[in-house]
Image (tube, rainbow, N blue to C red):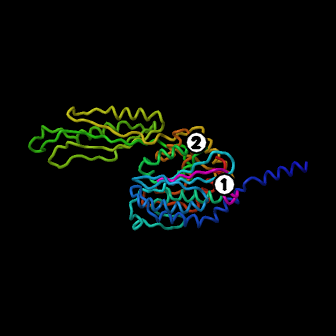
Amino acid sequence: MTRKKSQHSTKAASLPDWCERLRYFEAKQPQMVETIRELVEIESPSDNKAAADRMGMFLAEKFRTLSGTLRLHRAERYGDHLQFSLPGRGTAKPVLLLGHFDTVYPLGTLETMLCGIAGDRLHGPGVLDMKSGIALMFYAIEALQNWHGGLPRPVTIFLVSDEEVGSESSRKTTEALARESAAVLVLEPGAGLAVKTARKGVGEYTLKVKGVAAHAGLDPGKGHSAILELARQVAAVSKLNDLRKGLSVNVGLIQGGTRTNVIAAQATADIDVRIKSAKQAATMDRRLRALKAFDKHCQLEITGGINRMPMERTAGVAALYGKAQAIAKQIGWKLQEAAVGGGSDGNFTAGIGIPTLDGMGGVGEGAHAVHEHIVISELPRRALLLAGMIESA
């Protein structure tokens, strides 16, 4: 009887003390905040390669301290993407930690949108989306190395510089790394306190109209306005919305014409499409390409397509969420899940069938807005959750 009790005690002692782990990250909170401030104060807009590469160089030096192997994936138009491969014990496939260091803010934003602390909030451009998530990666890995004397399993970190503009140059590598991984954890912002188990797919289309130019005063009857035709098409496209089924279509940008006294010969509309399920992609694509001109003298051209297929809540995604829930429960945290309309690189990895859990990053509000911020006191819990998921995913 005594021996059985002793064996049970030994087994119990080998389990993680989650409250002690949380205290570890609480003690690290000031360092996490300082690291995030450093990242935010290096501006890295997607469309400025030189600036993005400065951010990449800083991250390369930071993550080299974790004793991994760095590989640069060169990009011509965007910053070079960073891949860190960290060895670990055992033969399990690596966990892929996915994120981006580009932001939507142009150079000079810090002159008017300062990075600073106000109460329990850290404000700044890109602080939520998603430089806080990058810092969480670093501190979770550092903690696991300290606790285990090295990582308990291999980890791959992939940080890209073009996520905010469609991930054109990084997508292929993202998908290749995901195929080599057991699971993908995406350090995009949380949905409030929740993680993200589903995302809509995203499409970008351009509708071009070619009309017939004429003098608006001398020959108004000889012209066929591309702008008028486009206006009719915008109304037609808007009818494709079906919010009940999770389909949304938005004409977000229109251009056309040359002068007020010229009947427009050209006009264009850029269209954003969101879909809830993969099967809706072909349907929406077919409907857009089937648009017909109201004025037979005008010609239509539709280009583009679905850029990101939906991240659907598959069994693999649900299993990861279940593990995350179990970890959170250890510290009395009832972790919720959410489905969101925005896309991320997690759409790519989930779309090829790799279990993916998104929204593992910072908690806050105002992504892409002047009030963008994170909640500082939530950093320890998010770091704890990430460390636990790396162990168990």
Q: Give the spatial CA distance, label 1 vs label 2.
A: 21 Å
Which residue is the extreme one toward the left? 218
Q: Identity of the amino acid at label 2?
A: Pro
Q: Is residue 189 visible?
A: no
Task: Classify 10 Å Cα crowding around label 1: few (below 14), some (14-19), many (20 and above).
Answer: many
Judging by the rendered image, the residue that carries numbered circle 1 is: 151
Highlighted magenta segment, given as a residue range? 145-160
Is 281 on the left or on the right of 254, as rendered?
A: right
Q: Identity of the amino acid at label 1?
A: Leu
**Residue pictured at 67% horizontal, 45% vertical:** 91
State whether residue 124 is above or below residue 334. below
Is 270 on the left or on the right of 384, as rendered?
A: left
| Mark 2: secondary structure | loop
Across and down, in percent, residue 143 comes to: 65, 59
Q: Nearer the viewer, residue 7 or 377?
A: 7
Across and down, in percent, residue 84 comes to: 56, 54
Label drawn at residue 355: 2
| Mark 1: secondary structure | loop
Which residue is the extreme one toward the right? 1
Quarter-of-image position of residue 362 = bottom right
Residues marked 1 and 2 touching at CB (< 8 Å): no
**Residue pictured at 86% horizontal, 52% vertical:** 6
